[in-house]
Amino acid sequence: MKKFYGKILWLAIALAFTAGAAVAKDVDWSTLNPAFQGATYVKDPSVCFGCHGDYEKPYSKTAHAKVFKFGKTPDAGDCESCHGPRSKHVENPNGELKLTAAQQTAACMQCHEGSTRMSWQSSLHASAGLACTSCHTVMQQKSDKALLSAAREDDLCYQCHSNVRSSMNKSSHHPVREGKLECSGCHNAHGSATPGMLKGGSVNETCYSCHQEKRGPFVWQHPPVMDNCQTCHDPHGSNNRKLQNAKEAFLCLSCHSYGGHVNIPRYNRVSSPYGEGCVNCHMAIHGSNSPSGAKLTR
């Protein structure tokens, strides 16, 4: 009975792993790389493991191995489902075929071309020459999530985005290092139509996915807020409270200076502005529905 439930559990994992993936389709390997021309399928994993035996046990524990076991791809369980026809490699092991990043990705996309990956070809990661295997491991499981090549998603991202790690170590930050939020909460690493590969249609739409109370619309709007949350906030981290780009008074004075700007109310300097907190009075800086809220006051 325990063995039966174990199989059911792995089936559930396999189905979750493939959720959103397209129906598998065959790769035209000879078109992908001319070196495949004339090669045929061996269709016997034991031939592969005769030389690559070190991979057999670690691979058997991966989500891919479970998916193949339950017949979710053509030629289920065959190494050549991902590596292509390898008769030439068996005949001449020293003539190993190296695929480019784009070719490796094309092999993965025969199964994994779901909606979250539609923008991969135009993504910053693809432009930088990354392949699926730059972030994912296929032959062994290092993470409980999506076969990532690091145990934690943020540690994987920081391998390239070290500047973001520095920001996340500042006193005010999103709770990524505490494990309550992940980079993929805001970003789609496989590409999107939004700058920064954001999951939302804009910076604000991405922020509103958690901060709905700031969305509005309000009777009295604060234009910089409606334009871009990053006008005032650094989403990766800041040494000012609430992820602010500067201390509150200086942040406000960047627009509301004593001299003022065209169509922007100026600061009336009741006292020295540098020791005052504008939000002591103007609390509703994200917008207000109050009848007396034209100046976003209490």
Image: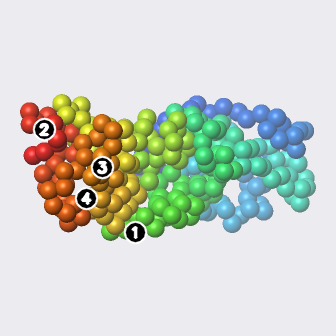
Amino acid on which the number 3 mark rests in the picture = Gly
Numbered label attached to residue 293: 2
**Quick check: can you spot residue 270?**
yes
**Sequence order check, earlier mark of 3 and 1:** 1
Residue 214 sits in which quadrant?
A: top left
Which mark is in front, 3 or 4? Answer: 3
Which mark is in front, 3 or 2? Answer: 3
Task: Work out how far the residue at label 1 is from the one at label 2, CA to CA, in angstroms.
Answer: 37 Å
Residue that extends furthest to the front in the rendered view of this protein: 259
Residue underneath mark 3: 259
Task: Work out how far the residue at label 1 is from the one at label 4, CA to CA, in angstroms.
Answer: 24 Å
Which mark is in front, 1 or 2? Answer: 2
Question: What residue is drawn where x is 82% and y is 47%?
Answer: 86
Question: What residue is drawn where x is 13% and y is 38%?
Answer: 293
Q: Compare residues 245 and 97 and report the one nearer the observer.
A: 245
**Sequence order check, earlier mark of 2 and 4:** 4
